[in-house]
């Protein structure tokens, strides 16, 4: 299984689907399923049963997961969508780098 180079808190741009072109932040990542939940993207209606926590029940809008291949990371330095290079820094720790501006993302 391929490794995900995108993680929670990253700003991404949606490349495909009904929300194509939107830029937002990743709320949750599921590396084992290769999916991410992006804020205000792929919003679906979900029917909820009445519970003690939500006695009214009814319809609720939630963000559904989308495949990681449908989003691209937006570099915080150059503000462009980019792919990610992983290199080791001076201390031997792995760091993510922007392929366009060659600056560290983390």
Image (spheres, grey):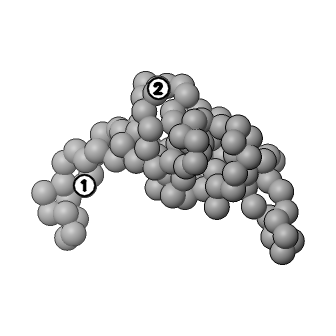
Whether residue 37 appears in this view of the structure is no
Q: Position of residue 6 (x, y in %)?
A: 64, 50
Q: Nearer the viewer, residue 74 or 72?
A: 74
Local secondary structure at mark 1? loop
Which residue sits at x=64%, y=61%? 106
Which residue sits at x=21%, y=69%? 53
Q: Position of residue 91 (x, y in %)?
A: 84, 75
Q: Nearer the viewer, residue 6 or 64?
A: 6
Label 2: few (<14), some or many (≥20) within 10 Å?
some
What's the CA distance linking mark 2 and mark 1? 32 Å
Label 1: few (<14), some or many (≥20) within 10 Å?
few
The nearer-to-camera label among 2 and 1 is: 2
Residue 83 left/right relative to 11: right
Q: Quadrant of residue 80?
A: top right
Q: Position of residue 89 (x, y in %)?
A: 82, 65
Asked if residue 95 is positioned above or below residue 46 in the image, the reply reads below
Local secondary structure at mark 2? loop
Number of marks present in the image shown: 2
Which residue sits at x=19%, y=63%? 54
**Circle 2/circle 1 CB separation < 8 Å:** no
Which residue sits at x=74%, y=41%? 99
> What residue is disc 2 on?
20
If you read the primary sequence from the N terminus, does the residue marked by circle 2 or circle 1 appear first? Answer: 2
Q: What mark, if any, has residue 64 been given in the picture?
A: none
> What residue is disc 1 on?
49
């Amino acid at each position: 299984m391929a490794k995900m180079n995108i993680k929670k808190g990253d700003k991404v741009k949606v490349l495909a689907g009904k929300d194509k072109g939107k830029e937002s932040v990743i709320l949750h990542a599921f590396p084992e399923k290769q999916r991410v939940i992006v804020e205000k993207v792929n919003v679906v209606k979900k029917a909820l049963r009445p519970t003690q926590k939500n006695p009214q029940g009814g319809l609720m809008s939630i963000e559904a997961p989308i495949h990681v291949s449908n989003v691209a990371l937006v570099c915080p330095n150059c503000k462009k969508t980019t792919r990610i290079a992983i290199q080791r820094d001076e201390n031997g720790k792995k760091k993510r780098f922007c392929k366009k501006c060659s600056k560290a993302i983390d």
